[in-house]
Amino acid sequence: MVFLAGFALAVNAGPVAAGLALFMIGIGFALVPALQARLMAVAGHAQSLAAAMNHSAFNLSNAIGAWMGGMAISAGYGWPSTGFVGSALAAAGLMVMVLSTLLPWLCAGAKSSEAAGSRPPRAGFSSYQKQGTH
């Protein structure tokens, strides 16, 4: 998010600053393997479906980002506005990720009258390795 907003500011600072901002945005793609590993860890027996949905989500987000960036340019805000649009979309994605991470805890809180003090299992590498699949 920060680098996308930084790109919007760096465009007016010159080509070197804009190039540096683009480089930093590109480094963000290094997170994709970690995302894929986490997805496989929580997917259980539906790993193929999870991988397909993950790629579909990337394609959908590319389309939405291009559309919203184009809308900002068409509205007269110019090329630098695409950085702010991308930053806003990244913030929305972060909110979805936080909510999806907290969902098991929120659901467990609603069921606390049934099993007082119990916590839902953490979805991560430790539970993935306990299944015996690597």
Image (cartoon, grey):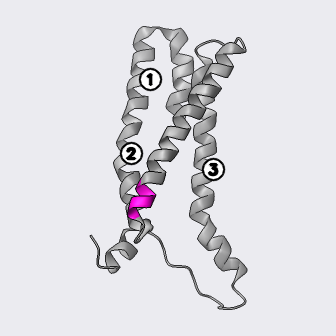
Q: Is mark 1 on a helix, strand or loop?
A: helix
Q: Check the image and report above or below for 107 versus 117.
A: above
Pointer 2 or 1: first along the chain = 1
Asked if residue 50 is among those painted magenta in the image, a careful observer would answer yes
Q: Is the magenta region chiefly helix, strand or loop?
A: helix
Kind of residue at badge 3 = Met
Q: Nearer the viewer, residue 67 or 21?
A: 67
Q: Distance between the residues labelled 3 and 1?
A: 23 Å
Asked if residue 49 is among those painted magenta in the image, a careful observer would answer yes
Q: What element carries label 2?
A: helix
The residues colored magenta run: 47-51
Q: Name the residue under label 3.
A: 95
Q: Check the image and report above or below for 31 versus 11.
A: below
Q: Residue at x 59, y 45 (%)?
A: 93
Kind of residue at badge 2 = Leu
Residue 71 pos. (x, y %): 68, 21
Residue 25 pos. (x, y %): 43, 30
Left or right? Give the position of 123 relative to 83: left
Q: Residue at x 50, y 78 (%)?
A: 121
Residue 21 — which label?
1
Q: Residue at x 41, y 52 (%)?
A: 35
Residue 31 — which label?
2
